[in-house]
Every structure is written in structure tokens, then in C-alpha cells.
């Protein structure tokens, strides 16, 4: 018994366009409402400027070396025997200063070894800030 007759059977159709529209609306809603967490952030504390405070200058130890290899530590003549003795003289010149700056004033004709003696003595005394005094040539 055929109740439908000879009619052609229609295949059911699923309309995807409204489904895509709904999915896009949901996607946009999720993108707008989602908060993104920053996992790798750096906590930086920046310094603040204060014009009233003056920077405290570190203690300076002036070491002069002449062409004959004589040493002068803060206007006191020092006769070199060993680097350890020179380190003790630097400690005495520094007094109770924590991180003094050793300024080496070497003559142009002073030996390289005499400058190395001062640098070695500063290392033995624990002073890491060493600088060299320079002189600009006279104008022509």
C-alpha cells in the first residue's frame, strides 16, 4: 500500500548560514568579554628625583707616579717596597671610606710596571674603582 503515491522524496536540507551567523556572534561575544592574563610581567620600581639631596662624592685617593718611579699618595711620598705595603698605604689614605676611587696620575715617562704596582695594591686593598688622570695637549 503506497500512501504517498509516486511523488519524489525530498532530501532534508540543513541551512548553514544562520548557524554560521550564530557562531560568529558567540565568538565575538567571547572575544569581547574575555580578559587576558599577563603571565610574564616585570615588577619595576623606578627611582624618584629629589632635587634637594646632594650626591655624596666618594673619597678620592690620588696616587702620583713620576718618571723615576717615585710614588706620591695624597701628597705623601711613599717609597715602594712591595705591593702589600702600597696597599696598606692606600688603606691609610682611605681612612674609613667604604669605596674610595683610586686616581692614578702617572708621568708619561713612568714605567708600565709602576702603574701595575698601584693597580695590584688597589686590588689587594679591595678597591675596585680605579681611574687614570689625563691631560689634554696644550692648544696650538
Image (cartoon, rainbow, N blue to C red):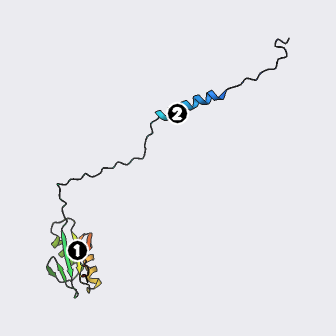
Q: Nearer the viewer, residue 133 or 69?
A: 133
Between residue 115 and residue 86, name the one nearer to us: 115
Residue at horizontal 50%, vertical 31%? 29
* Residue at (21% x, 75% y) in the render: 87
Please tell me which residue is depicted at 29% across the width and 83% down the height of the picture.
112
User: Of label 2 and label 1, which has the lower sequence position?
Assistant: 2
Relative to residue 24, is residue 127 drawn left or right?
A: left
Task: From the image, state whether disc 2 or disc 1 is nearer to you.
Answer: 2
Could you tell me how far apart the alpha carbons at marks 2 and 1 are, in whole angstroms? 67 Å
Q: Write the residue at 82% across / 20% down.
A: 8
Q: Residue furthest left?
A: 76
User: Which image quarter holds the N terminus?
Assistant: top right
From the image, which quarter does the C terminus lie in? Answer: bottom left
**Front position in the image: 139 or 73:** 139
Which residue carries the number 1 mark? 103
Q: Is residue 8 above or below residue 122?
A: above
Q: Position of residue 26 (x, y in %)?
A: 54, 30
Evaluate if marks 2 and 1 touch, with contact meaning CB atoms under 8 Å apart: no
63 and 97: which is toward the camera: 63
Q: Residues within 10 Å of mark 2 (few under 14, many from 20)?
A: few
Mark 2 lies on residue = 28
Q: Residue 27: horizontal and vertical position, in percent?
A: 54, 33
Q: Quadrant of residue 16?
A: top right
Amino acid at each position: 500500500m503506497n500512501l504517498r503515491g509516486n511523488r519524489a522524496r525530498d532530501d532534508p536540507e540543513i541551512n548553514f548560514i544562520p548557524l554560521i551567523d550564530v557562531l560568529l556572534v558567540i565568538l565575538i561575544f567571547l572575544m569581547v568579554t574575555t580578559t587576558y592574563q599577563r603571565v610574564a610581567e616585570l615588577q619595576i620600581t623606578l627611582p624618584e628625583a629629589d632635587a634637594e639631596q646632594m650626591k655624596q662624592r666618594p673619597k678620592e685617593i690620588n696616587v702620583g707616579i713620576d718618571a723615576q718611579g717615585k710614588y706620591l699618595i695624597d701628597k705623601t711620598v711613599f717609597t715602594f717596597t712591595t705591593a702589600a705595603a702600597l696597599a696598606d698605604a692606600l688603606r691609610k689614605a682611605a681612612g674609613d671610606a667604604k669605596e674610595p676611587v683610586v686616581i692614578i696620575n702617572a708621568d708619561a715617562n713612568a714605567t708600565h710596571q709602576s702603574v701595575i704596582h698601584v693597580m695590584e695594591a688597589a686590588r689587594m686593598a679591595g678597591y675596585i674603582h680605579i681611574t687614570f688622570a689625563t691631560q689634554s695637549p696644550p692648544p696650538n
